[in-house]
Amino acid sequence: VIRIVFLGDIVAKPGRKALHKFIPKIKEDYKPDFIIANGENASGGLGITPSVVDELLFYGIDFITTGNHIWKHKEINDYLDNKSNKIIRPINYPISKSFTTPGVGFSKIDHNKYNILVINVLGRTFTQEVDCPFSKIEHFMENVDRDKYKIILVDFHAETSSEKVAMGWFLNGKVSAVVGTHTHVQTADERILDKGTAYISDLGMCGSMDTVIGVDRDIIIKKFLTCRPISFKYPEINLGVNGVVIDIDEDTGIAKYIKRINIREN
Ligand SMILES: [Fe+2]
Ligand SMILES: [Fe+2]
């Protein structure tokens, strides 16, 4: 059995501080073989820079998925293309003859004795009109060497629970785990679907838990009351980490266990 810890969106500096603080505890409590996290908000609340990738790896994260905010910092484009095999972007950004998209949407990872395939895919409902996440992943899966890659993890970065639940059932029995990211609010629906796929609609976030999804709550309340733009702040109030621990049978790729992680200062 391989034990995976998958953590939700790391939000700004408090998110990085929360990892620095709590990853030793996660390692002690869960003894994971592989720690993966969504880093799309890790730099200043939106996007991620190469130096922050390095910082997260230093804290003990083994691999980073992302989402719709991946393009915020331009330095990451070149990094996604050439300089890192530790970070991916959603697989269903369009590729045309006129324009390409930096990076890749999947990674075949050789981690200790395990071969792990990680796929990142972006939902379309209330996010962005990228290529169809369902057909994109279906086509991709047709060419996966299933004898070599039995442990397959999918980060479905999407807004609505219906789109996420649908993806869980769509990939049931085809991958080891489908975990949702993007909303920053952890859901209580983690379970193993009937064909052996671990599922949760959203992992939650890493950062300041007594905020509005990582952002200063007074600022966000003012934004709702005024309907005018306002600059965000990411204060440090009650650091925490959200995610799941998943056990997967490495011989079959079938998930055996999934449980929420919700650690916070208070
Ligand atoms: Fe996010
Ligand atoms: Fe997002």
Image (cartoon, rainbow, N blue to C red):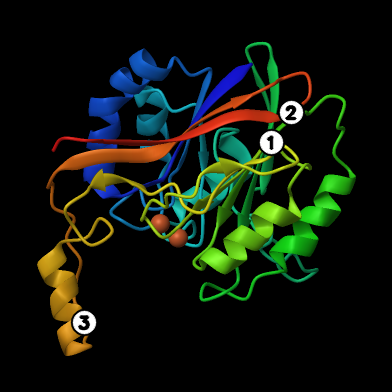
Element assignment for label 3? helix
Q: Position of residue 91 (x, y in %)?
A: 68, 54
Is the CB of mark 2 within 8 Å of ligand 2?
no
How dense is the environment of label 3, judged by Cα within 10 Å: few (below 14), some, or many (20 and up)? few
Q: Do the residues labelled 1 and 3 touch (CB within 8 Å)?
A: no
Where is the N terminus found, in terms of image quarters? top right
Q: Residue 176 carries which label?
A: 1
- Residue 217, quarter of picture: bottom left
Element assignment for label 1? loop
Q: Which amino acid does label 1 sit on?
A: Ser
Where is the C terminus found, in terms of image quarters? top left
Mark 2 — residue?
253
Q: Where is residue 41 in the image (x, y as percent from the top left)?
A: 37, 53
> What residue do we see at 62% from left, 76% from top?
129
Q: Which of marks 2 and 1 is nearer the N terminus?
A: 1
Q: Are marks 2 and 1 in contact (CB under 8 Å)?
A: yes
Q: Where is residue 190 in the image (x, y as percent from the top left)?
A: 51, 44
Q: Which of marks 1 and 3 is nearer the N terminus?
A: 1
Q: Are marks 3 and 2 in contact (CB under 8 Å)?
A: no
